[in-house]
Image: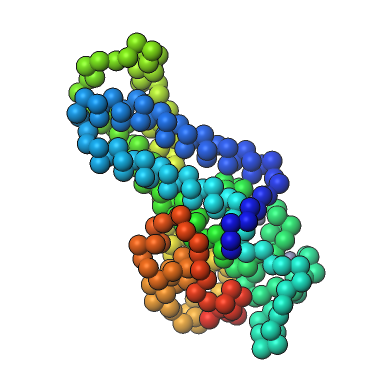
Amino acid sequence: MGFRVHFVVDPMGWCCISMVFFVWIYNSFFIPKLILFPHYEEGHISAALLIGYYVASVCCVTSLIRASVADPGRIPQDPHIPLTEKELWELCNKCNMMRPKRSHHCSRCGHCVRRMDHHCPWINNCVGEDNHWLFLQLCFYTQVLSLLTLALDFCQYYYFEPLARVQEQELFVFKHELAFLRISTFMGIIMFGGMSGLFYTQLTGVLSDTTTIEKMSHYFDDTSKPRKPWQQTLAEVFGTRWKILWFVPFRKRQPLRVSHHFASHV
Ligand SMILES: [Zn+2]
Ligand SMILES: [Zn+2]
């Protein structure tokens, strides 16, 4: 995959990804300023919580940026098709190019993508074979970050002791604390609710080795497909058998199978 930047020109996608960034900025700058740092300074919360919050935040934004600018698995202009694999390729009737089976033509991006799952406006990119792992990480870390934010909002409202000292220059923030907390809680509920549902459908899809497009078109007959062990399906998507690395967005994915050669092709 490499680190080549892949940028989709789509104003609707730019609006969607800007909204996601806004939620991230709000959570990552405002919540620490309003809740984490003041209560840490007064000894109400531990350094571990502060560090944990920032780790979730950095992993979240890294997977968002990388999923958005990564090449999802675009088919090259003049693909080299080995003779032995000829029957595994087909012609796309939209772009008139040969592509491996299980590829799909994205009408928004205007090209075919290997093992395309779906086009996601929230990352303004296709989710395909090469960036599916980053999309799963994004779903996971968004849930962690929004759950932590909701817990902090709840504690700030009901449990934390009032702050002993409030800086003069930060008075505005603390004066309007309730409004800021309500906005944060509202966004937290939307993000956590939406992401939990999405993460569940994504995981069930990955574990049954079926993409969202295939599920929607009922292309695959689940009963006829040999079921792979869950470790293998996840290792193939994340590009490593090291389970701890499945959670790390700061690395390069190494495909475990030939990219256009699938054990369960149709
Ligand atoms: Zn095509
Ligand atoms: Zn697309």
Q: How is the image coloured?
A: rainbow
18 displayed left or right of 152: right
Tell me where residue 118 appears, x and y as whole percent: 59, 58
> Vertical placement of 88 versus 47: above or below?
below
Residue occupying image coordinates x 35% and y 37%: 149
In the displayed orientation, state which residue is furthest to the bottom: 84
Residue occupying image coordinates x 27% and y 40%: 49
Give the quadrant of ligand 1. Answer: bottom right
Residue occupying image coordinates x 39% and y 76%: 229
> Vertical placement of 185 versus 196: above or below?
above
Tell me where residue 4 appears, x and y as whole percent: 63, 56
Give the quarter of the image for residue 29. Answer: top left
State whether residue 72 appears in this view. Answer: yes
Quadrant in the picture for the N terminus: bottom right
Residue occupying image coordinates x 78% and y 65%: 94
134 displayed left or right of 149: right
Mark count: 0
State whether residue 194 appears in this view. Answer: no
Tell me where residue 53 appears, x and y as whole percent: 34, 40
In the displayed orientation, state which residue is furthest to the right: 96
Front position in the image: 235 or 121 = 235
Front position in the image: 118 or 165 = 165
Quadrant in the picture for the C terminus: bottom right
166 displayed left or right of 192: left
Give the quarter of the image for residue 51. Answer: top left
Tell me where residue 220 appears, x and y as whole percent: 56, 74
